[in-house]
Image: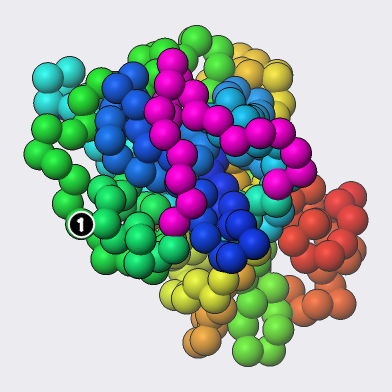
C-alpha cells in the first residue's frame, strides 16, 4: 500500500460561555457528516500558525489569531480502493476571534458550524483527534468512512519536500542540556542541534522523538510537555541528495527529561544525520555554534 503524508493545523475557539466551535464535514471531504475542530492542510512553506488562521477564515468566515500550540497528534486513514494510507500530523492551536462573521463553506470542507459543550459534543460523530482534544471518549467512525482522498497532489514536485519532525529540549537532573551535532553532508553540518528528527509513517510525534533520542544519543527520556512549533523554509537546501531542494520543515519542540543520564553515544547506523552527541552544563551552551531552533529553545543566540 502506498504511504502518503500530510500536515494539518486546527484551532480551539471558545465563546463567552466556554463552548467550542466545531465544523461538520461536507460531502466534498473524506469524512462527510463528521464534526471536528476547524482547520486543514498546511501549504508548502506556510507556517502552521498562519495556516490555521487561513483555514479558519475559509471554513468559518471568522478572522482569528493563533495563540499557543496545544497538542500535536497523528493518525492514519486507509483508502483501500485507492491503495493508499494517509498519515496526517495534526497541530492544534488555541485561537482568538478578531472579527468576521460566522458562516460555513459548503463548497469546501464544512457544511455546518456549531458551538458545543463537551456533553453536547458526545451526541454527534466526532473525528478521533477532536474527541481526544475535548477529553471525550473516542468512538469508531462509520464503516464507510473515510471516502475521498484528501485534496492535494499525490506526489510532490521532484525538488520539493515537506517534512514533519519532533525535537526535544532534553535535560537531566543536573540541568545539563543534551545536544547533537549535525553530520557532514546535511544542512547545518557542524552545528549543535536539538535531539530528534522526522517521524515515521504511523508514528505519534512524542513517540518518534523518544525513538530518535535513543538512536542519536543512547538516552531513555520522558516527554514533559509540548513547548512550541517551529517552521523552516529553505528554498535551496543542499543535503545528501546532492542537489538543491525546496525544503519545508514543520517541527514540534517538546521538553524532555532524562532521569538516569548516561554517556551520550550515537547508536544509529553510520551515514546518518548525527555525528556526535554530548551533555552540556548551562554555562557551556551559550558558547556553542548552534542551529537557530536549538538557540531559541535553549534561550541563546545562534552563532
Q: Number of labelled discs?
A: 1
Q: Does residue 36 lie above or below 78 as drawn?
A: below
Image position, residue 131 (x, y; %)? 35, 58
- Picture quadrant where residue 148 is located: top left
Badge 1 crowding class, 10 Å Cα cut-off, few under 14, some 14 to 19, many 20 or more, is: few
Residue at 79% from the left image edge and 53% from the top image edge? 290
Relative horizontal placement of residue 139, taking residue 40 as reference (left or right): left
Task: Specify start and end residues of the magenta stretch as a single range.
Answer: 97-116
Name the one closer to the observer, 102 or 222. Answer: 102
**SS at badge 1:** loop
Q: Does residue 136 lie above or below 303 as drawn?
A: below
Name the one closer to the observer, 99 or 78. Answer: 99
Q: Is residue 98 magenta?
A: yes
Q: Does residue 102 lie above or below 247 as drawn?
A: below
Q: Does residue 109 lie above or below 37 as drawn?
A: above
Name the one closer to the observer, 112 or 5. Answer: 112
Q: Is residue 164 magenta?
A: no
Residue at 50% from the left image edge and 72% from the top image edge? 223
Residue at 26% from the left image edge and 48% from the top image edge? 125
Q: Which residue corresponds to mark 1?
A: 139
Whether residue 180 is visible here, answered yes or no, is no
Whether residue 230 is visible here, answered yes or no, is yes
- Picture quadrant where residue 47 is located: top right
Image position, residue 165 (x, y; %)? 52, 46
Image position, residue 130 (x, y; %)? 39, 53
Residue at 40% from the left image edge and 28% from the top image edge? 111
Name the one closer to the observer, 303 or 122. Answer: 122
Location of the N terminus (image quadrant): top left
Image position, residue 233 (x, y; %)? 70, 29
Colour pattern of the rendering: rainbow
Amino acid at each position: 500500500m502506498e504511504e502518503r503524508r500530510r500536515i494539518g493545523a486546527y484551532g480551539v475557539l471558545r465563546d463567552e460561555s466556554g463552548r467550542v466551535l466545531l465544523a461538520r464535514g461536507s460531502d466534498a471531504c473524506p469524512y462527510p457528516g463528521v464534526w471536528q475542530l476547524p482547520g486543514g492542510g498546511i501549504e508548502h512553506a506556510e507556517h502552521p500558525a498562519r495556516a490555521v488562521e487561513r483555514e479558519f477564515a475559509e471554513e468559518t468566515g471568522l478572522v482569528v489569531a493563533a495563540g499557543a500550540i496545544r497538542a500535536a497528534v497523528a493518525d492514519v486513514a486507509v483508502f483501500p480502493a485507492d491503495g493508499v494510507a494517509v498519515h496526517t500530523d495534526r497541530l492544534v492551536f488555541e485561537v482568538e476571534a478578531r472579527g468576521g462573521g460566522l458562516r460555513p463553506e459548503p463548497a469546501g470542507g464544512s457544511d455546518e458550524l456549531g458551538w458545543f459543550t463537551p456533553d453536547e459534543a458526545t451526541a454527534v460523530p466526532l473525528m478521533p483527534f477532536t474527541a481526544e482534544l475535548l477529553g471525550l471518549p473516542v468512538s469508531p467512525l462509520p464503516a464507510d468512512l473515510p471516502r475521498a482522498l484528501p485534496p492535494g497532489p499525490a506526489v510532490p514536485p521532484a525538488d520539493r519536500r515537506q517534512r514533519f519532525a519532533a525535537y526535544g529540549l532534553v535535560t537531566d537532573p543536573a540541568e545539563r542540556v543534551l545536544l547533537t551535532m549535525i553530520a557532514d553532508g546535511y544542512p547545518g553540518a557542524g552545528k549543535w542541534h536539538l535531539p530528534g528528527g522526522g517521524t515515521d509513517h504511523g508514528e505519534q510525534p512524542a513517540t518518534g522523538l523518544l525513538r530518535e533520542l535513543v538512536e542519536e544519543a543512547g538516552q531513555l527520556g520522558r516527554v514533559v510537555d509540548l513547548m512550541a512549533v517551529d517552521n523552516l523554509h529553505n528554498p535551496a537546501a543542499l543535503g545528501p541528495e546532492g542537489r538543491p531542494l525546496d525544503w519545508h520543515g514543520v517541527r514540534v519542540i517538546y521538553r524532555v527529561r532524562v532521569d538516569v543520564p548516561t554517556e551520550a553515544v550515537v547508536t544509529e547506523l553510520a551515514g546518518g544525520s548525527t555525528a556526535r552527541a554530548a551533555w552540556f552544563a548551562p554555562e557551556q551552551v551559550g558558547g556553542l555554534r548552534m542551529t537557530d531552533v536549538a538557540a531559541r529553545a535553549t534561550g541563546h543566540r545562534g552563532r
